[in-house]
C-alpha cells in the first residue's frame, strides 16, 4: 500500500529555505560574471586613474579566473550567518557603542554597504514582504516567537559578500569597487530567489503572518517630496507671527482687526466704550459648520465650506496657528474636490470629512508632512474607491454605501478624529480586500497559467546559465553541448517548475551536470581516473532517468549517450583516439592596465536612465494605468499580477476584460504618450498644488 508522504514541518521548510538561498549565492559570480565585468569597465571609463585601474584589474582577474571560488566563499559566509545569527547580528540601537577611527578604505566599504543595502531593500520590498511574512510564521512555529527573518534580508547578503571578499584576501579598494558594481546583479538574483521562495512556501501551505501589502491609496514609491514639510513649515512660521488683538463689547458682535462694533441692540454705547469679553470657542464652532454641510452630490457649495468658516473664524478664539491650518486644509480640499477623476457621489462623501480633517490637522500637524497619517490614508482610499467602483460598476452602490458609513463613523466621534479616520480606513480596507479576493478568484486560472509559463522560462534561463558556465570552464565536445542544451535543459526547467524554484532535485541535477563535465576530462592521476570510472554509471543512470521523465524516445537516448560515451572513451581507452575536438571558451589570464583601457574604450556608453521603464517596473498589484487611445478596449486598467521578470496582467475595474504586457512594451506606450501611470493619492496631488499656491518660491 502506498503511504502518502507526510507534509514537511516548519523546521524542514526553514532548512529548505536556507539551502535554496545558499544555492542562489553559490552560483552568483558564475551567472553574473559578464554583467559585473561590464559594469566595472564602465566605472573605470568614467574616471580613469591609476588607483581605479589597479582596483578594476584586481576585480577582473578574480572574476575571470576564480568565479567559482568567489561564489563558494560568498555562500559559505552566508551559511555561517544562518548557523550563527547572534554572532553576525547588527548592533542594536539600545546597545552601547564604542567610537573608533576608521581608515578611508573601511569607511568607503561601509558607505558602499549602506548604499547597496538601501538600494536593494527599496527595489525588493514587494518580494521581501510577501516572503518574510511567511518566514515569520515558520520562525514562530519553530522558535516560539516572531523574528529571525533579518538573516535573509539584503543587509545580511551584502555583509556575507564583503566578508567573503575579506576571507579571500581581496584588496580592500577592489572589494569596494566590486560591491558597488554588483548591485544590479544582486538585485536580479535576490528578486528571483525571494519570489521563488515565496511561491514555494505558498505551495507548502504556509500562510502570511501579517498583511504586507501597502494600504490601498498610499504612496509607497514617492519619487519627489509632496511639499508637506514645506507647508507645515509655512504654517509654523505664520503661527510665530504676532497675533492681532481681537476685542468684543458686552452683548455685541466681534469685529476683527479694529473693525466697527455693533452692539446687540443695534446702536453703539455712548462714548463708544468697549471692554474685553470671552471670545466664542473656535473648536465649538466647528460642530455648527459640520451640521450645515451640504448633502447633495455635486453641490456648488461643497468646496466653499471651509472658506466660509474662514470668514467667521476670526470672531472666535482661534489663534494664528489655527487660522494657518484652516487656510491650508481649505486649500487642500479645494484641489481635492476639483479633481476630475473623482465622481460627484464620492466628492459628496469626501465633503463630509472637511471638518474632521481640520480637527485632525489641528491636533496632529504632521497631517501635512506624513502621507501615512490616518486622515490622508482614508481620503486617498476614497479616491481609490472612486476609480475602482465608478458609476457603471455593478458594485458601485455597495461601495458608495460603505464609503458613506465610513464617513459617518468619523463624524460620530468629533473629539477623536484621528482614531476615527484610522478605524474607518480599516473598515473600508477590509471590504475592499474581500472584493479584491473575489476578483482574484476569477483571475486565478489565468494567473496560475502565467506563473507556470514564467517559472518554465526562468528555469530554462537558469539551466542555460548553468550549462554555459560549465561549458566555459570545462572543455566538452560540441555534439555533447548541443544535446545537453536540447535534452537536459528542458528537464531542469521542468524540475524548477515542479519544485517552485531551486529545490532538492534541481540541486541534484546541477551536481549531475557538473560531474558529467568532469567525466569528459582526462584524469590527472590514477586515483582520479578510478574515481571517474566508478562515477560514470551513476551519472549516466541519473541522466537517463531525467531524460525519460521528459518523455525522451529510445532513439534520442541512444544519440545522447552515444555522444557522451564517445568522449569518455577518449581517456578511458586512449587507443581509441580523439574523435572530436573539445570546445571551451574559458582561458584564465591576467589583464594588464593596457588591456583594461582598451576593453573599456571599446564599450558603448551606458544607456541613459530610462525613467519610463523604471515607472513600468515599479508597478505593483492594484496599481492603475491609463491608456489613450484605449488599449485592448480599456482606457484605464488595473494591474492584476506582476511577474518576476516584468510581465504584467491587466484587467478592468470588474476583473472581466484583461490583457498582458511586459514592462518594455508598457514603457514604449508611456514614452509615446499613449499610456500614463496616474498619481492615485488625492492628498499627494493636492499637496503639490497647495505648495505651489502657498509657497511661490517653491513652485
Image (tube, rainbow, N blue to C red):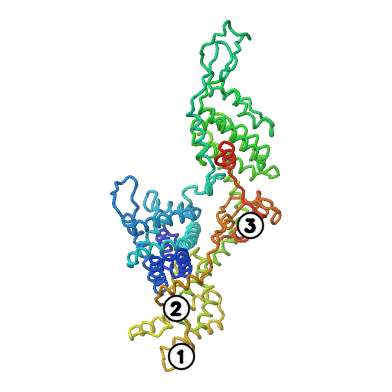
Horizontally, residue 349 falls left or right of residue 15, namely right
Disc on res. 578: 1
**531 or 311, nearer to the observer:** 311
Compared to residue 503, the image places residue 566 above or below, namely below
Spot occupied by residue 119 in the image (x, y as percentages of width and height) = 46, 55
Q: Secondary structure at mark 2?
A: loop
In the drawing, what numbered circle is on residue 331?
A: none
Where 422 falls versus 110 (above or below)?
above
Is residue 2 in view from this perspective? no
Precedes in sequence: disc 3 or disc 2: 2
The residue located at (54%, 43%) in the rendering is: 226
* Mark in front: 1 vs 2: 2
In the rendered view, would you say 608 is above or below 684? below
Say which of 458 and 581 sits in front.
Answer: 581
Q: Secondary structure at mark 1?
A: loop
User: Which image quarter is the C terminus in?
Assistant: top right
Amino acid at each position: 500500500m502506498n503511504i502518502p508522504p507526510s507534509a514537511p514541518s516548519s523546521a524542514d521548510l526553514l532548512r529548505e529555505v536556507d539551502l535554496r538561498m545558499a544555492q542562489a549565492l553559490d552560483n552568483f559570480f558564475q551567472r553574473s560574471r559578464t554583467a559585473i565585468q561590464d559594469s566595472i569597465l564602465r566605472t573605470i571609463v568614467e574616471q580613469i586613474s591609476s588607483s581605479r585601474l589597479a582596483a578594476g584589474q584586481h576585480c577582473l582577474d578574480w572574476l575571470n579566473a576564480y568565479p567559482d571560488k568567489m561564489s563558494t566563499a560568498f555562500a559559505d559566509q552566508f551559511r555561517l550567518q544562518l548557523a550563527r545569527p547572534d554572532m553576525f547580528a547588527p548592533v542594536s540601537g539600545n546597545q552601547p557603542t564604542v567610537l573608533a577611527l576608521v581608515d578611508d578604505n573601511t569607511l568607503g566599504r561601509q558607505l558602499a554597504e549602506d548604499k547597496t543595502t538601501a538600494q536593494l531593500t527599496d527595489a525588493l520590498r514587494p518580494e521581501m514582504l510577501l516572503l518574510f511574512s511567511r518566514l515569520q510564521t515558520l520562525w514562530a512555529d519553530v522558535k516560539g516567537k516572531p523574528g529571525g527573518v533579518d538573516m535573509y534580508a539584503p543587509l545580511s547578503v551584502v555583509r556575507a559578500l564583503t566578508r567573503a571578499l575579506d576571507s579571500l584576501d581581496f584588496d580592500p579598494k577592489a572589494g569596494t569597487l566590486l560591491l558597488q558594481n554588483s548591485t544590479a546583479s544582486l538585485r536580479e538574483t535576490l528578486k528571483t530567489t525571494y519570489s521563488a521562495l515565496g511561491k514555494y512556501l505558498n505551495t507548502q501551505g504556509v500562510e502570511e503572518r501579517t498583511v504586507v501589502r501597502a494600504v490601498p491609496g498610499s504612496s509607497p514609491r514617492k519619487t519627489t517630496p509632496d511639499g508637506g514639510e514645506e507647508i507645515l513649515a509655512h504654517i509654523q512660521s505664520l503661527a510665530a507671527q504676532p497675533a492681532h488683538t481681537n476685542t468684543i463689547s458686552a452683548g455685541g458682535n466681534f469685529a476683527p482687526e479694529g473693525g466697527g462694533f455693533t452692539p446687540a441692540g443695534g446702536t453703539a454705547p455712548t462714548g463708544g466704550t468697549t471692554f474685553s469679553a470671552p471670545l466664542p470657542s473656535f473648536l465649538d464652532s466647528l460642530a455648527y459648520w459640520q451640521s450645515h454641510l451640504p448633502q447633495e452630490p455635486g453641490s456648488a457649495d461643497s468646496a466653499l465650506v471651509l472658506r466660509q468658516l474662514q470668514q467667521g473664524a476670526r470672531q472666535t478664539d482661534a489663534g494664528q496657528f489655527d487660522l494657518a491650518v484652516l487656510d491650508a486644509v481649505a486649500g487642500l480640499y479645494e484641489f481635492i474636490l476639483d479633481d476630475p477623476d473623482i465622481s460627484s457621489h464620492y466628492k459628496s462623501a469626501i465633503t463630509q470629512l472637511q471638518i474632521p480633517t481640520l480637527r485632525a490637522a489641528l491636533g496632529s500637524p504632521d497631517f501635512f508632512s506624513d502621507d501615512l497619517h490616518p486622515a490622508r490614508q482614508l481620503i486617498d482610499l476614497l479616491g481609490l474607491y472612486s476609480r475602482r467602483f465608478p458609476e457603471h460598476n455593478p458594485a458601485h452602490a455597495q461601495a458608495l454605501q460603505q464609503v458613506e458609513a465610513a464617513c459617518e463613523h468619523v463624524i460620530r466621534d468629533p473629539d477623536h478624529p484621528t482614531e476615527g479616520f484610522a478605524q474607518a480606513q480599516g473598515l473600508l480596507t477590509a471590504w475592499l480586500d474581500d472584493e479584491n479576493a473575489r476578483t482574484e478568484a476569477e483571475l486565478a486560472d489565468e494567473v496560475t497559467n502565467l506563473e507556470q509559463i514564467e517559472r518554465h522560462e526562468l528555469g530554462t534561463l537558469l539551466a542555460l546559465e548553468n550549462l554555459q558556465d560549465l561549458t566555459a570552464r570545462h572543455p566538452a565536445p560540441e555534439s555533447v553541448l548541443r544535446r545537453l542544451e536540447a535534452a537536459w535543459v528542458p528537464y531542469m526547467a521542468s524540475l524548477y517548475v515542479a519544485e517552485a524554484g531551486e529545490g532538492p532535485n534541481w540541486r541534484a541535477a546541477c551536481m549531475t551536470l557538473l560531474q558529467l563535465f568532469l567525466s569528459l576530462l582526462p584524469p590527472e592521476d590514477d586515483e582520479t581516473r578510478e574515481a571517474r570510472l566508478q562515477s560514470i554509471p551513476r551519472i549516466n543512470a541519473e541522466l537517463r532517468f531525467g531524460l525519460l521523465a521528459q518523455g525522451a524516445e529510445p532513439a534520442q537516448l541512444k544519440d545522447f549517450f552515444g555522444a557522451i560515451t564517445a568522449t569518455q572513451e577518449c581517456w578511458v581507452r586512449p587507443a581509441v583516439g580523439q574523435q572530436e575536438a573539445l570546445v571551451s571558451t574559458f582561458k584564465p589570464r591576467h589583464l594588464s592596465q593596457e588591456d583594461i583601457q582598451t576593453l573599456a574604450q571599446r564599450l558603448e556608453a551606458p544607456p541613459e536612465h530610462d525613467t519610463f521603464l523604471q515607472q513600468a517596473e515599479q508597478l505593483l498589484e492594484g496599481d492603475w494605468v491609463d491608456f489613450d487611445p484605449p488599449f485592448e478596449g480599456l482606457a484605464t486598467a488595473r494591474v492584476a499580477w506582476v511577474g518576476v521578470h516584468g510581465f504584467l496582467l491587466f484587467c478592468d475595474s470588474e476583473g472581466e476584460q484583461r490583457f498582458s504586457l511586459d514592462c518594455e512594451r508598457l514603457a514604449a506606450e508611456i514614452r509615446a504618450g499613449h499610456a500614463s501611470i496616474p498619481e492615485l493619492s488625492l492628498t499627494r496631488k493636492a499637496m503639490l498644488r497647495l505648495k505651489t499656491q502657498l509657497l511661490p518660491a517653491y513652485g
